């Protein structure tokens, strides 16, 4: 791809000159401000060659710059080489982010163009302020990348389906009624939703328009008078589904008709919208006489707190997913012991084969990361048939994978020892696990947020001068997106919201450490926030671990684990063994029993010694 990037940038610059534009901004976004995009909106990747999930491209007449975060520094350096696009590292001391850079480099009379369907209303408002300060103009009505993009992929056409009733405990009528109560509290007569997982959750529908995410392209306009309109491609819905939606007060209109519907709102109406999750091009259709109420979508918080019934389904999914992982890891060990040539791509295949055999499986929840040795130092590495490594009988293999099931979404990372390991590798694996255990064991008062807990997972690493550049935890959907808000566990950001962790919220717990050219470590479980106890100081919460799969103790340096660490690990493995053993037999059961034995048990696997 990189050999064509200079030509694409040249064509873009010619269009910029033709339209009197001095700079083009190409975010990673679509009209729904999704994290993962249909191919139709992957303009940033097409013009830069960098295909990571996060990044922003800025193109001027003489240069191009790509901003991304530390998860992708190494990948971006590789993919941008020779493209004419310079890497700009986010959240690095003394390095400006793209909005600050634009304010510094644009001047009076300059024009910045960005496609309005890939820019949030919140970002547009900030850009207006920044550009006004330096005298530059902003155009959101000119999609220059779209004009230049040859053979741009069409919009996806996959069908919309009903989430199987056996896995749904609240009807769309009841969910919409709850939403309308929240609208009433905001004084809103209308509510516009563009975030795809919110829409899918509210209507108990699923799709496959976005790879690994069971959502579909749509907007939803909900009125306070028991009426709602779903804007979606008609061809995606069966007649029976359209009729069922109508019975529940939801009409269907064409996807592109949302602008006309907004333009028809009467003066004096009030509309609730989340400016961070509505595209500026969509919001531009709202008449001046309509009051905008900018607030988070109420449904985002509703769906984050899983119900008792949803958690029951998720726990069953975790057992099934754990069985698949045990079988896949056992087969991997068997292949390597037999001397069968095995690559990182083969690991993905093994996981797919075992997960797809489980009841209720739908697909992967994200592209599997199987990174051997130095490749694991790339947090979002993806092996391909063209670029991968062959596994050897030594070192570490990091496997980050997940599944979409009708009853839930999984996400797990394990690090496996394929043979001899170094003392440095074992030390790093153990320190990361200590951080994971510390956070998993945490108790915290109601009202505490993820950023307040983040340091618990980092403290063992900080004590040894180590750290990692990504967040420690993200929310996870219920047969929805593997990354879900509004909560998260990450270092505090200036001005960032502190979303309280609430009972029923699911989060990943995934500290790591990455040493480019050597190895990468990450341990990850999913956990749900649960009630712990009430004291004279109020209600306290804790994490219940949901993921069920043993850790490879051969990667650890047991002497670095304290008594509490050892007790947690042994208790966890006892839980895994009790949950999975009834579903396994033969060599798979033997594998499980061996890997779940207490850490202090005689005959446990000892790490291979190598300095």
Image (cartoon, helix red, strand yellow):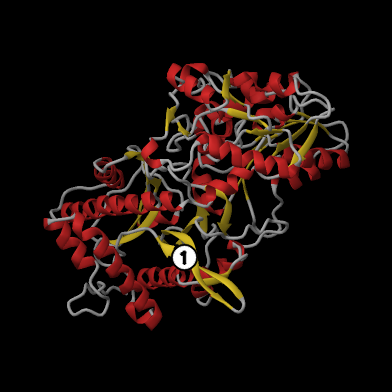
Asked which secondary structure carries label 1, the reply is strand
Locate residue 103, reporting x and y percent.
Answer: 80, 43
Task: Work out whether 95 lies above or below 345.
Answer: below
Task: Identify which residue, 137 or 367, lies in the foreground.
Answer: 367
Task: Identify which residue, 305 or 196, lies in the foreground.
Answer: 305
- Asked if residue 466 shows in the view, the reply is no
Residue name at image x 57 percent, y 67 percent? 453
Whether residue 237 sits left or right of residue 338 in the image: it is right
**Quadrant the C terminus occupies:** bottom left
Locate residue 150, reporting x and y percent.
Answer: 55, 19
Find disc 1 in the rendering and name its residue. 543
Residue name at image x 19 percent, y 67 percent? 594
Residue 590's quadrant in the figure? bottom left
Residue 593's quadrant in the figure? bottom left
Locate residue 99, reporting x and y percent.
Answer: 73, 44
- Asked if residue 282 shows in the view, the reply is yes
Task: Work out whether 520 lies above or below 557.
Answer: above
Q: Total number of numbered labels?
A: 1
Whether residue 245 sits left or right of residue 566 in the image: it is right
Mark 1: few/some/many CA within 10 Å (<14, 14-19, 20+): many
Residue 173's quadrant in the figure? top right
Task: Work out whether 134 lies above or below 470.
Answer: above
Task: Identify which residue, 20 or 27, lies in the foreground.
Answer: 27
Locate residue 38, reporting x and y percent.
Answer: 51, 30
Whether residue 510 sits left or right of residue 140 in the image: it is left
């Amino acid at each position: 791809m990189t050999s064509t990037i200079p030509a694409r940038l040249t064509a873009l610059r010619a269009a910029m000159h033709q339209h009197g534009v001095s700079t083009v901004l190409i975010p990673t976004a679509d009209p729904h401000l999704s994290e993962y995009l249909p191919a139709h909106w992957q303009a940033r990747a097409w013009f830069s060659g960098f295909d990571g999930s996060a990044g922003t491209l800025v193109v001027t007449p003489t240069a191009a710059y790509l901003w991304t975060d530390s998860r992708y520094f190494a990948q971006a350096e590789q993919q941008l080489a020779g493209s004419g696009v310079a890497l700009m590292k986010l959240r690095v001391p003394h390095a400006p982010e793209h909005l600050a850079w634009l304010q510094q480099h644009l001047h009076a009379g300059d024009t910045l163009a960005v496609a309005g369907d890939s820019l949030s209303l919140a970002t547009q408002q900030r850009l207006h302020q920044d550009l006004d300060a330096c005298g530059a103009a902003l155009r959101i009505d000119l999609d220059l990348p779209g004009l230049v993009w040859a053979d741009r992929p069409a919009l996806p056409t996959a069908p919309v389906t009903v989430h199987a009733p056996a896995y749904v405990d609240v009807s769309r009528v009841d969910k919409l009624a709850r939403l309308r109560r929240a609208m009433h509290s905001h004084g809103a007569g209308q509510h516009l939703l563009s975030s795809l997982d919110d829409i899918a959750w509210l209507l108990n529908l699923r799709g496959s328009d976005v790879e690994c995410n069971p959502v579909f392209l749509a907007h939803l306009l909900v009125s306070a008078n028991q009426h709602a309109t779903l804007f979606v491609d008609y061809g995606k819905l069966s007649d029976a589904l359209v009729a069922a939606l109508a019975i529940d007060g939801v009409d269907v209109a064409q996807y592109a008709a949302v602008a006309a519907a907004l333009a028809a709102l009467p003066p004096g109406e009030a509309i609730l919208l989340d400016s961070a999750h509505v595209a500026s091009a969509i919001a531009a259709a709202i008449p001046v006489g309509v009051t905008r109420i900018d607030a988070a979508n109420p449904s985002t918080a509703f769906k984050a707190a899983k119900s008792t019934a949803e958690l029951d389904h998720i726990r069953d999914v975790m057992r099934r997913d754990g069985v698949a992982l045990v079988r896949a890891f056992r087969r991997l060990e068997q292949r390597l012991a037999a001397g069968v040539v095995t690559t990182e791509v083969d690991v993905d295949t093994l996981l797919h084969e075992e997960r797809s055999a489980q009841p209720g499986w739908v697909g992967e929840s994200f592209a599997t990361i199987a990174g051997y040795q130095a490749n694991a130092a790339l947090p979002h590495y993806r092996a391909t048939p063209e670029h991968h490594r062959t596994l050897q009988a030594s070192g570490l293999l990091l496997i980050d994978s997940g599944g979409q099931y009708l009853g839930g979404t999984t996400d797990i990372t394990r690090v496996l020892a394929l043979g001899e390991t170094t003392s440095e590798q074992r030390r790093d694996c153990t320190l990361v696990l200590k951080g994971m255990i510390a956070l998993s064991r945490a108790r915290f008062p109601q009202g505490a947020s993820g950023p307040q807990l983040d340091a618990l997972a980092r403290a063992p690493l900080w004590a040894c001068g180590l750290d990692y550049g990504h967040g420690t935890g993200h929310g996870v959907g219920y047969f929805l997106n593997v990354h879900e808000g509004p909560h998260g566990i990450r270092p505090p950001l200036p001005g960032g919201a502190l979303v309280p962790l609430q009972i029923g919220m699911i989060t990943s717990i995934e500290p790591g450490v990455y040493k480019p050219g050597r190895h990468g470590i990450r341990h990850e479980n999913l956990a749900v926030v649960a009630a712990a106890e009430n004291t004279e100081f109020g209600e306290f919460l804790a994490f219940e671990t949901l993921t069920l799969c043993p850790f490879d103790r051969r990667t650890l340096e047991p002497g670095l684990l304290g008594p509490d660490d050892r007790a947690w690990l042994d208790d966890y493995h006892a839980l895994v063994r009790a949950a999975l053993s009834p579903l396994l037999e033969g060599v798979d059961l033997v594998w499980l029993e061996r890997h779940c034995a207490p850490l202090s048990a005689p005959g446990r696997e000892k790490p291979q010694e190598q300095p």
